[in-house]
Amino acid sequence: MTRTLGLFALVAALILGTGFLQSWNSALIILNMGLVSAIMALGVNLQWGLAGLFNVGVVGFVAVGGLAVVLVSMAPVPDAWGAGGPRVIGAILFGIGVVFAAVLAWKKLGKGVRGWAVAAITVAGFFAYRALLDPAVDAIEAVNPAATGYLGGLGLPVLLSWPVGAALAAGVAWAIGKTALGLRSDYLAIATLGIAEIIIAVLKNEDWLARGVKNVIGLPRPVPYEIDLQADAAFVETARGLGLDPTTASTLAVKLGYSLLFTAVLVVLLILAQLALKSPWGRMMRAIRDNETAAEAMGKDVTRRHLQIFVLGCALCGMAGAMMTTLDGQLTPGTYQPLRYTFLIWVMVIVGGSGNNLGAVLGGFLIWFLWVQVEPMGQFAMNLVTSGMADGSWLKGHLQDSVQHMRLLTMGVILLLVLRFAPRGLLPEK
């Protein structure tokens, strides 16, 4: 307990130090993304720490959560719906029907013909699906493409998109898990990586869905806008009473609002994860992780239990993705990079301590802080090292240009040091 409190106090001191030495806006930005990262790490920890499932498609589930924000909170585009909305819905339902028909044919027909039947259904179904979908998509994307060109959303409160993001990610995870969880861990990793890339490709290219790489900006907020606060006489008076400039105070108030919302979500999820960890279900999952063969011999349905925890972990990643997109106020599919939303989340879990929920949360805060702060600290260090070198020196220029690589270098060094001196993480599983 002392070690846990000490490490969390260290992370708190780092964030507070950023507030005192740089700015409180910077400290709150780090805190907010640290909270979101902690939820992503918690989801991956459920999968890997409790069940030993190697999911390297985290970025795909985060992106699905981001898409949920657009689908839930943005206002519908009536002209786009009039141009082809019902036809797109019909084409999607037709595509789902083709998949079910292929599955049914595989199950019901004999071995000699079912392969040919499935091939005929899927090939004919694919061409029919494209014939239905393509004209509708062209019509939707032709509706004011500079500003809309997509169907929009449902116009509901943006906070509703967080559980919807979790539900969408869980649905995708269920579909993946039904086909991929029977694979060995290395093949499961390859499958999740590939499916995540497919999800990102769909988001980038299907403009009718969320404008693709043209991005969706101006997403609704669950907190007030800065300009509204600055126009509020009571807020301005309170800010001046605290000795703050109203403009600065409004930016701090908005970020603090996000911090409170994110903290509430993280606390609830952490409590639920701890209860699950210490429940008979959690002990069963760890028994399956440690020895699948023995657990199966005791009558446990290993594949079904794996599917449960895979869906739960992906749901947390989807919710975190929706929260992050809400914080950004825009959906930018081009920014979903595996390096940021898969590799870094895994570093958080490994450094914090896999199998320990508090360790995953600690790793989320600590690694995100270092990810943000290493580059300015590296710039300071490099300026110090090159201060005695002549201007125009090739070595000075080379070292100065290398600062941008300090972030990745530092993550690699931290990972190696932790694996060498604390292979079970800073807060190991008990």
Image (tube, helix red, strand yellow):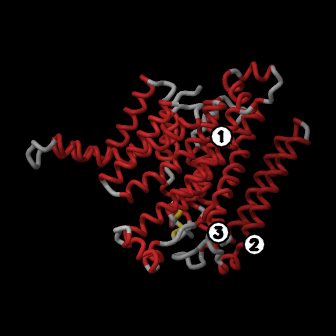
Residue at the extreme left: 390
Name the mark nearer the viewer: 2 or 3: 3
- Give the foreground label among 3 and 1: 1
The kind of secondary structure element at disc 2 is: helix
The residue under the point 57% across, 66% down is: 222
Going by the image, does 347 lie left or right of 207? left
Q: Which mark is residue 377?
A: none
**322 versus 210 height, above or below:** above
- Most extreme residue toward the front is 241
Left or right: 55 as drawn, with respect to 245 = right
Q: CA distance from mark 3 to mark 1?
A: 27 Å
Residue annotated with mark 3: 157
How many residues crowd mark 1 within 10 Å: few (<14), some (14–19), many (20+)?
many
Instruction: State the image quarter where residue 149 is shown.
Output: bottom right
Q: Position of residue 26 (x, y in %)?
A: 38, 56
Residue that label 2 marks: 86
> At x 61% / y 55%, what residue is drawn?
65
Q: Which residue is mark 1?
A: 273
Q: Residue at x 82, y 41 (%)?
A: 115
Residue 180 x, y percent position in the rendering: 70, 37
Callout 3 secondary element:
loop
Q: Secondary structure at mark 1?
A: helix
The spot of residue 369 in percent (x, y) is 41, 45
Closer-to-camera residue (284/134): 284
Residue 345 placement (x, y as % from top left):
51, 42
Gap between marks 2 and 3 measured at Cα: 24 Å
- Out of 129 and 60, give the one closest to the viewer: 60
Which mark is first along the chain, 1 or 3?
A: 3
Q: Nearer the viewer, residue 21 or 399?
A: 21
Q: Amino acid at mark 1?
A: Ala
Image height check: is 219 above or below 357? below
Mark 2–mark 1 Cα distance, whole angstroms, equals 41 Å
